Image (spheres, rainbow, N blue to C red):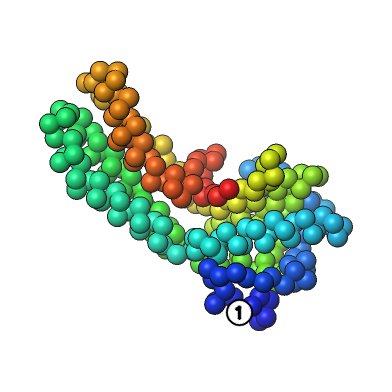
Amino acid sequence: MNFINNMSSALGQSTVFNTELLRKNHFCMGKRRSKRYVCSSEVDEPNIINNVVELIIEAIRRIWHWRVWDLWWVEEWMDKLLIIYNNVEVWLRGKYGEEVINNILRLVDEFISYNERLWKYWHDVSNEVKRLIEDLVSGRAEVIIRGNDISGISVHGKYITLSVDKASNDSIMVQLKLKGFESVIIEVLDVFMKTMSREEYAKFVNGVLRALRGGFDETDGFNERGKATMGTT
């Protein structure tokens, strides 16, 4: 199908989109129902469709650039966590007590457990990202427009929702919202504060705890209404 210049070879390369096919997608104004937007009325106004097509192109370019359907980003963070777990005692021994070290290991183990579940989930559903893109570039997708000023769009899949939002400064946020995979909040016990001075605790938070959290921030992962969400601006 000639909807772009060879889709398979275009991954990671500059792509020329067939905007006529993109305009053949089903466009509708969205109405919020429960936790998601659904179609409420058809949209055939050319100017609105042209603006939405620009958002679609930007979203697809970013998804292709990062190849988010692959497992590389999950595996890369898992490798970092395993390095931290294997070396944390060496790094902290002599600086902090046994209780602090054991609690750090527990934190890292929770991150590893969450990442393992994410790997299994993404292994099963990530191909839907490619199918969603294929539907968009071939004009088969349902594109829900949010807001009269076209503040954003949503494209629903079975497991993944593509959400594209325009910010007030004209920047664009592209998100993949995962269905059936809950986000988690990992609690840090106050044992660290109890065993350190205020200055030591500040250094510990910046040097150790934020380093653990930062691995997920590299993929711009976050919690949105309890759902795991990946995004890029």
Q: Is residue 130 above or below residue 51?
A: below
- Residue at x-position 66% and y-position 81%: 1
Q: Residue furthest bottom?
A: 1
Q: Which residue lies furthest to the right in this view?
A: 45
**Residue at the (23%, 33%) spot, across then down:** 103
Q: Mark 1 points at which residue?
A: 6
Question: Hey, which quadrant is residue 201 in on the image?
Answer: top left
Q: State the residue in front, 29 or 59.
A: 59
Q: Which residue is drawn at 29% across and 20% down?
A: 199
Q: Which amino acid does label 1 sit on?
A: Asn
Can you give x and y, in whole percent of width and height, for residue 131 in the image? Answer: 58, 68
Q: Where is residue 140 in the image (x, y as percent from the top left)?
A: 70, 69
Q: Tag 1, which secondary structure?
A: loop
Q: Place residue 157 in its image quadrant.
A: bottom right
Q: Is residue 182 above or below residue 72?
A: above
| Label 1 Cα crowd, 10 Å radius (few <14 / some 14-19 / many 20+) | few
Residue 33 visible? The answer is no
Q: Position of residue 28 (x, y in %)?
A: 78, 55
Q: Determine whether, in the image, residue 94 is placed left or right of residue 233.
A: left
